[in-house]
Every structure is written in C-alpha cells, then in structure tokens.
Image (cartoon, rainbow, N blue to C red):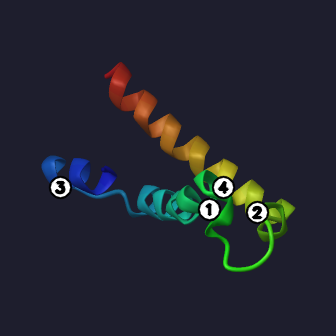
Amino acid sequence: MLERFFEKKGEKDEELMIHARELDRHYIPSRYPDAHSSGTPHEAYDEETSKRAIRAAEEVVNFARKIVSG
C-alpha cells in the first residue's frame, strides 16, 4: 500500500520503505502461529528483533499521522 502511495505522489521515501519491509516480515507469522517452519513464535523473536519491529511501526505510524493531519 505504501508503494502505491509513493507512486501516486511521484516520490519515494526509501527509509520509510525499509521500515515497511521490516514490518512485512512479521505480518504472516504474527497472525498465524503455525507459520514458523520450526518452533513456536516466541522462539523466533528476541529483544533486538522486537525493538526493530517496534521502531519500524513507530516510523510508519508517524508518517501516516503527518499525512492525515495535512
């Protein structure tokens, strides 16, 4: 969705796209616990992975807030 937004705007924020791709990695496994080929979901995440995902989410949400507020 973010890529389509940037296509329409005629610009691209590569740093934001990196954050969005980071979040993409977590989409399926977080929704479907059996998506991990081995082990349980909690075994796939460590503190650093979680912090990266939280930071990426914060960046994307902050961007969306700016767009919505004009």
Task: Indicate the amino acid at tag 1.
Answer: Pro
Counting residues from the start of the chain, the first of labels 4 and 1 encountered is 1
Counting residues from the start of the chain, the first of labels 4 and 2 encountered is 2
Q: Residue 29's image quarter?
A: bottom right
Query: Residue 52: horizontal and vertical position, in percent?
Result: 69, 59
**Front position among marks 4 and 1:** 1
Q: In the shown orientation, is residue 57 left or right of residue 50?
A: left
Counting residues from the start of the chain, the first of labels 3 and 2 encountered is 3
> Residue tagged by mark 4?
53
Do the CB atoms of the residues marked 2 and 1 lie less than 8 Å apart? yes
Task: Indicate the amino acid at tag 4.
Answer: Ala
> Residue tagged by mark 1?
29
Do the CB atoms of the residues marked 4 and 3 lie less than 8 Å apart? no
SS class of the residue under badge 1? helix
Residue at 67 percent across and 79 percent down: it is 37
Q: In the shown orientation, is residue 64 left or right of residue 27?
A: left
Residue at 22 percent across and 53 percent down: it is 4
Determine the residue located farthest toward the front in the rendered image.
34
Inter-mark Cα distance, 2 to 1: 7 Å
Do the CB atoms of the residues marked 4 and 2 lie less than 8 Å apart? no
> Residue tagged by mark 2?
41
